[in-house]
Image (tube, helix red, strand yellow):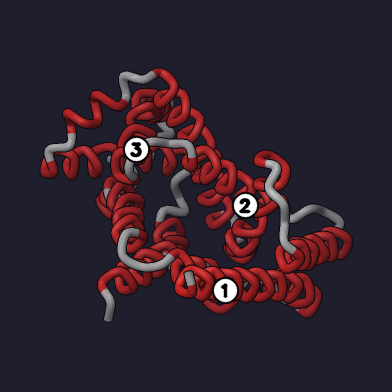
Amino acid sequence: MNKGLLYAILAYLLWGFLPVYWKALQTVPAGQIVGHRMVWSLVFVGVLFFLQNRWSHFINTIKNKKVLLIYLSAAAILTVNWFIYIWGVNAGYVVETALGYFINPLVNVLLGVVLLRERLRPGQWAAVGAAAVGVLFLTIVYGTLPWIALALAFSFAIYALIKKTAPLAALDGLFLETALLFLPALLFLFYQDRLGAGAFGHTGLTITLLLIFTGLATGLPLLLFAAAARRIPLSTIGLLQYLAPTIQFLLGVFVYQEPFNLTRLIGFSFIWLALVIYSAESLARRRKAAVTHAAN
């Protein structure tokens, strides 16, 4: 198997099964898990920085105030995304968190239109329209917006949009994002400990070790994804990206026994139809572009 393909599959498998990890930390408040994720991600990435001797280039880059502002914004949005995702998983909304990452590519397209003045092709309009019908159907039937899914989709889409202008590589960017929030996260964790609510070191060795390894659980799939992105076409990554929410969806329905009746199936079917249209249109366009390029 192509190395890039293997790295991509491993990355999406790890992201897909991440709810199992957060469920193991279900007794810990979501805010504390996010705090530990920030702290230990910095430790994990810092070790890699030291081993790869990347410090000189990194320090020169972050002297630019614009770069710092970009990554501070990215870190703030990422924190919101992480909190909602972890809270959603541990509150019993794994299926809805999966929905968020199903519709995320379509939200990316929508933000491109609204913020970047991009023009949608007919197939993209059809995909966005089908997804909107699915979300509207679920909202009308249940009397409330699927806010967890929408919050995850929009926060991650905004994060991706910010990172489009970011000059650092994936590892460098993650290091800076976690470094900027390291001190606030650490102070928050110390405050929780002083209140007697801290989980680290007080709720058993297993929980303490799982909190420490949140850094590895965060950093490893990102590194695998970064390695894959350099080796395989974006069209392949575009198709593989649905592997993670599909696993999360299956976990929610069949492992955690979350309700998934006919009504939800109808709503989700519109979303899945939108993704089929979007993926087919994107693949057809890339193939046409490749043929045109080869002819020239």
**Left/right of residue 263 with respect to residue 164 in the rendered view:** right
**Left/right of residue 82 with respect to residue 173 in the rendered view:** right
What residue is at 21 percent from the left and 31 percent from the top? 57
Residue 271 location, quadrant: bottom right
Residue 39's place in the image compared with 210, above or below, is above
Element type at mark 2: helix
What residue is at 54 percent from the left and 67 percent from the top? 245
Q: What residue is pinned by disc 3?
A: 168
Quadrant where the image shows the N terminus: bottom left
Residue 172's place in the image compared with 157, above or below, is above
Q: Residue 108 carries which label?
A: 2
Residue 35 visible (yes or no):
yes
Label located before the other in sequence (2 or 3): 2
Q: What residue is pinned by disc 1?
A: 288
The crowd level at tag 1 (other Cα within 10 Å; few <14, some 14-19, many 20+) is few
Residue 115 location, quadrant: top right
**Left/right of residue 125 with respect to residue 227 in the rendered view:** right
Q: Are marks 2 and 3 in contact (CB under 8 Å)?
A: no
Could you tell me residue 11's position as x and y percent?
36, 64
Q: Which amino acid does label 2 sit on?
A: Asn
